[in-house]
Image (cartoon, grey):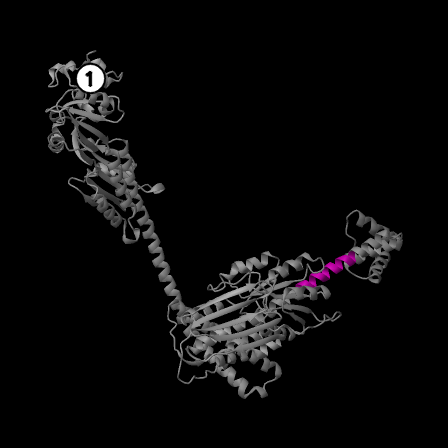
C-alpha cells in the first residue's frame, strides 16, 4: 500500500496547498502526515478541492487546515494560521467561538450562526465583520468526534450595505414641509444620522448665515465639531478635507450652481477601512443632507412667495368688497333720480331726452349688476357666501326668472321653452335666481337663432336645473375652463363682446355654496347645455314667493344693449359728411348717433365689422368711428381690411375702446388708426377729434384732386400745337387761375412790352422748359 504524503494530501497548485505541503506538521499536535488517521485524510480530501471557504479543525486543540478559498478570510493571519490551534489563531474572538466549537466537539451537535458580528484583527486594526458559518462534527471510526468542518461565508458587505441603505432611505424621507428653515432641515437630518452611529459616530452640520462664516446648527456624537478654519475653507472652496489625526471628513453641502450652504463634518468608524463603498456612502449622506437643505431653502422661498400672494389675494378681496360697497352709494344716487324721472316725468320729456334718460338708467342698472357680481366674487373668494335657506317652490321661482327673458328672447327671434316641475325645497332663493338669470342671459347672448330651453326636475335627493341652447357652442378644449374666474372663450361670437368673464364662474361659486355642482356639455355650432345639481332638502312649511323683478332688471337692461341696429340701405349722393359708426352696444350706438347727427353729419350705425365693410364698400364714408371690442372680428381687424382696400385706404379711422393706457393706444395707431379715443370720453372731445379728421381728410382729398387737375391741364397745354395755348396752360398751373385770366396776363405783358402775343407766349414756354418761373 502506498503511504500518504503531504504532496498526496495537498496536491493543488494554488499557494495555500503549497503552503500546506511545506508546513512542518511533525511539530504540530497532529504529528507527521504519514501518521494521520484515515478520517483526517478523508476530511482533508473533502476540504482542499472545494471552492467554498472551508476550515478544518482537528483534534482536541482544533489544529487548523483550510483550502485556498478560505485564505482571504484570514487576512494578515495567513500563513501563520496553517497548523495553528484555533484558540491561538482567533484569540480576539475566541470567547464567542469557543462555546460553539465545544458544542460540536463535546456534544457532537452541529451549529449554525447567521450574520454573526466578530471584531477581528486581520489587517492591523480591530475590524467590524459579519459572518454566516456552521460547525459540523467529523466522527472517528469509533463514533467519537475527531474534528470540526467549518463552512464560512463573509457577509460583511451585505450587512453594511443594508444598514447604510436604511440610513439613506430615512434621510430621503425627511419632509421639507416640517422644516421651517434650513437649520431645521439640518437638525432633522442629523437626528436621522444619529441612528447610524456605527457608520458615522460623529456628525456636525454647519450653515452659512448671511455674510458670516458657517456656524454649527446641529451635531451628534462626541467631538463632532471641527476647526472653524477648515469648515470655512471647505464651505468656500467646495472641496472636502480629511482630518487624519481623528479620522474625520469635512465635506461641502453643495447647493448646485449657487455654491454651498455650508459644510458637514463626519467622523468615520475606527472599525472599518475607508474603502470605496464607505466613501460612496458618505458622499450620498452628504448629498442627502445638502438636498434637504436645498429643498428647504427653495420651499422657504416658495412659502414666502405663497404667503405674499395670499396676502395680496386677501388685499384684492378686501379691495373688491370695499370698492363694491363704495360704488353702491353713487349708484343709488344715479338710479333713484333716473327712476323717478322715468316713472313720474317721462311724459314731459322730449322723445330724444326720454331715450337718453332710459339709456342712462339701463347703463346704471348694468353697472349695479357688475358691482353686485364683483361683490359676490369677493365673497366667494373669501368664503363669505352665507346661505339663507328657506322653503322655496323651485319650479315657480325658475319659471318667474325665465318669464323675465321671454320678451327679450322673442325679440331676438328665439323660442324660449320652459319645462319645470318639483315640490317645495329648502333653498337660498336669491342664489338660485342668480344662477338661473346668469345662465339664461348667457344662453340668449350666444344663441343667434333657434331655442333656449329651461328645465327643472327634482329627485329624492337632488334638484337639477338645465339650460340648453342651440347657439354657437364651446370648443372642447375650452369646456374645462369656462367656469374659471375672468376666463373668456376666444373665437366664440355672441351678440356682444362686452363682459368680464365672471358670470359662469359666479354660477359655479353659487352652486358650490348651495352644496352642488355645475357642468357643461357643448358641441361647436350646435349649442350648449349647462346642468346645475344641488342637494334637495324637503320642506313642510309654506314656500315664500320671491320677487325677481328687481334682480332681473339689470340682466334685461344689458340684453337691451345687444339689439342690432335697424337695417338701412346705404344712400349715395348726399352732400352731408358721412360717418360710419361701428358699435355693438345698442345704447352706446344710439347715443353716438345722436351726438354725431347733431353736427349735421349723416351717421350710418352698424353692430359688427362684416356689416361695416359691406356698407363702406357700397358708399364710401368720410370717417369711420369704430369700437375695438366687437362680436366676431374686432375693430383692429376691420381697420386692417379698410387699409388694404384701395378705395377705402385713405378713409380716416378713429377707434373707440374701454382699454386705458398708452400701450393700447400705440397698438391701435401702429395698426393704422388715425386716432384713438378711450371710454369714457367727453362728448366735445370726440366731436372735436372727429371734425379735425373730417376736415383733414377733406383738405387732403381736395389737394389730391386739384393736383390731378393741374397735372391734367399742364399735360393738355404741352401737348397742344399752339404755343399760345401752351403758355396759357402754364400760367393756369402757376397762378391757379382759369384760361381767361391766364390769357389776360399774356395780353397785358404784350401791351406793356409792346411785343406780340405769340412772341410773349413763346418766351413763356421757353422759360418754363428751361426751368425759369414766368412773370
> In the image, residue 546 lies at what x, y percent?
46, 82
Q: Is residue 482 visible?
A: yes
Left or right position of 533 against 416: left
> In the image, residue 168 lies at what x, y percent?
28, 42
- Can residue 705 be found in the magenta stretch? yes
Residue at position x 46%, y 84% in the image = 545
Q: Toward the viewer: 99 or 380?
A: 99
Q: Toward the viewer: 506 or 113?
A: 113
Residue labelled with disc 1: 20
Residue bounds of the magenta highlight: 696-710
- Can residue 30 be found in the magenta stretch? no
Left or right position of 665 against 232: right
Which residue appears farthest toward the top when viewing the image? 2
Quick one: label 1, few (<14), some, or many (20+) residues within 10 Å? many
The image quarter containing residue 97 is top left
Left or right position of 307 against 664: left
Element on which disc 1 rests: helix
Amino acid at each position: 500500500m502506498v503511504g500518504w504524503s503531504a504532496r498526496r494530501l495537498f496536491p493543488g497548485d494554488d499557494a495555500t496547498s503549497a503552503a500546506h505541503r511545506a508546513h512542518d506538521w511533525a511539530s504540530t499536535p497532529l504529528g507527521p502526515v504519514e501518521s494521520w488517521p484515515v478520517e483526517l485524510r478523508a476530511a482533508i480530501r473533502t476540504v482542499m478541492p472545494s471552492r467554498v471557504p472551508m476550515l478544518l479543525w482537528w483534534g482536541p486543540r482544533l489544529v487548523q487546515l483550510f483550502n485556498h478559498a478560505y485564505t482571504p478570510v484570514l487576512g494578515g493571519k495567513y500563513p501563520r494560521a496553517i497548523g495553528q490551534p484555533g484558540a491561538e489563531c482567533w484569540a480576539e474572538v475566541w470567547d464567542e467561538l469557543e462555546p460553539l466549537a465545544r458544542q460540536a466537539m463535546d456534544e457532537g451537535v452541529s451549529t449554525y450562526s447567521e450574520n454573526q458580528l466578530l471584531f477581528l484583527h486581520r489587517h492591523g486594526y480591530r475590524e467590524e465583520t459579519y459572518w454566516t458559518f456552521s460547525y459540523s462534527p467529523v466522527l472517528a471510526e469509533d463514533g467519537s468526534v475527531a474534528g470540526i468542518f467549518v463552512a464560512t461565508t463573509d457577509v460583511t458587505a451585505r450587512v453594511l450595505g443594508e444598514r447604510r441603505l436604511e440610513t439613506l432611505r430615512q434621510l430621503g424621507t425627511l419632509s421639507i414641509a416640517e422644516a421651517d428653515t434650513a437649520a431645521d432641515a439640518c437638525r432633522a437630518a442629523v437626528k436621522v444620522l444619529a441612528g447610524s452611529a456605527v457608520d458615522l459616530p460623529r456628525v456636525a452640520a454647519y450653515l452659512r448665515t448671511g455674510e458670516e462664516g458657517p456656524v454649527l446648527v446641529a451635531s451628534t456624537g462626541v467631538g463632532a465639531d471641527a476647526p472653524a478654519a477648515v469648515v470655512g475653507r471647505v464651505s468656500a472652496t467646495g472641496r472636502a478635507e480629511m482630518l487624519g489625526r481623528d479620522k474625520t471628513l469635512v465635506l461641502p453641502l453643495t447647493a448646485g450652481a449657487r455654491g454651498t450652504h455650508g459644510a458637514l463634518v463626519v467622523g468615520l468608524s475606527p472599525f472599518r477601512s475607508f474603502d470605496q463603498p464607505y466613501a460612496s456612502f458618505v458622499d450620498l449622506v452628504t448629498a442627502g443632507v445638502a438636498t434637504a437643505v436645498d429643498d428647504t431653502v427653495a420651499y422657504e422661498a416658495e412659502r414666502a412667495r405663497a404667503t405674499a400672494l395670499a396676502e395680496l389675494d386677501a388685499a384684492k378681496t378686501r379691495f373688491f368688497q370695499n370698492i363694491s360697497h363704495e360704488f353702491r352709494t353713487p349708484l343709488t344716487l344715479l338710479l333713484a333720480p333716473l327712476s323717478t324721472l322715468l316713472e313720474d316725468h317721462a311724459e314731459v320729456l322730449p322723445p330724444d331726452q326720454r331715450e337718453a334718460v332710459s339709456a342712462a338708467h339701463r347703463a346704471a342698472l348694468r353697472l349695479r349688476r357688475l358691482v353686485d357680481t364683483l361683490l359676490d366674487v369677493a365673497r366667494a373668494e373669501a368664503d363669505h357666501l352665507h346661505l339663507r335657506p328657506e322653503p322655496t317652490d323651485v319650479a315657480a321661482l325658475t319659471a318667474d326668472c325665465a318669464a323675465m327673458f321671454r320678451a327679450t328672447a322673442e325679440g331676438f327671434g328665439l323660442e324660449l321653452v320652459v319645462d319645470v316641475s318639483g315640490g317645495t325645497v329648502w333653498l337660498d332663493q336669491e342664489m338660485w335666481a342668480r344662477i338661473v338669470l346668469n345662465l339664461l342671459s348667457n344662453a340668449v347672448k350666444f344663441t343667434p337663432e333657434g331655442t333656449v330651453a329651461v328645465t327643472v326636475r327634482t329627485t329624492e335627493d337632488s334638484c337639477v336645473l338645465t339650460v340648453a341652447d342651440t347657439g354657437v357652442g364651446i370648443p372642447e378644449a375650452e369646456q374645462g375652463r369656462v367656469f374659471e374666474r375672468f376666463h373668456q372663450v376666444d373665437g366664440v361670437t355672441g351678440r356682444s363682446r362686452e363682459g368680464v368673464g365672471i358670470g359662469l364662474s359666479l354660477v359655479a361659486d353659487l352652486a358650490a355654496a348651495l352644496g352642488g355642482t355645475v357642468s357643461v356639455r357643448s358641441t361647436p355650432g350646435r349649442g350648449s347645455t349647462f346642468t346645475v345639481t344641488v342637494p334637495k332638502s324637503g320642506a313642510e312649511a309654506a314656500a315664500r314667493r320671491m320677487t325677481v323683478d328687481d334682480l332681473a332688471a339689470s340682466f334685461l337692461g344689458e340684453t337691451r344693449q345687444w339689439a342690432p341696429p335697424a337695417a338701412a340701405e346705404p344712400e349715395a349722393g348726399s352732400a352731408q359728411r358721412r360717418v360710419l359708426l361701428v358699435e355693438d352696444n345698442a345704447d352706446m350706438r344710439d347715443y353716438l348717433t345722436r351726438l354725431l347727427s347733431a353736427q349735421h353729419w349723416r351717421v350710418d350705425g352698424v353692430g359688427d365689422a362684416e356689416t361695416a365693410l359691406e356698407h363702406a364698400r357700397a358708399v364710401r364714408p368720410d370717417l369711420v368711428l369704430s369700437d375695438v371690442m366687437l362680436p366676431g372680428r374686432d375693430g383692429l381687424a376691420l381697420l386692417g381690411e379698410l387699409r388694404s382696400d384701395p378705395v377705402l385706404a385713405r378713409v380716416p379711422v378713429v377707434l373707440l375702446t374701454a382699454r386705458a393706457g398708452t400701450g393700447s393706444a400705440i397698438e391701435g395707431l401702429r395698426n393704422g388708426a388715425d386716432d384713438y379715443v378711450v371710454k369714457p370720453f367727453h362728448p366735445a372731445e370726440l366731436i372735436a377729434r372727429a371734425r379735425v379728421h373730417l376736415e383733414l381728410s377733406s383738405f387732403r382729398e381736395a389737394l389730391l384732386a386739384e393736383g390731378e387737375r393741374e397735372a391734367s391741364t399742364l399735360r393738355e397745354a404741352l401737348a397742344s400745337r399752339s404755343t399760345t395755348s401752351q403758355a396759357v396752360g402754364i400760367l393756369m398751373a402757376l397762378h391757379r387761375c382759369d384760361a381767361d385770366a391766364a390769357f389776360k396776363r399774356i395780353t397785358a405783358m404784350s401791351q406793356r412790352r409792346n411785343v406780340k402775343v405769340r412772341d410773349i407766349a413763346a418766351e413763356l414756354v421757353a422759360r418754363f422748359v428751361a426751368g425759369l418761373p414766368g412773370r
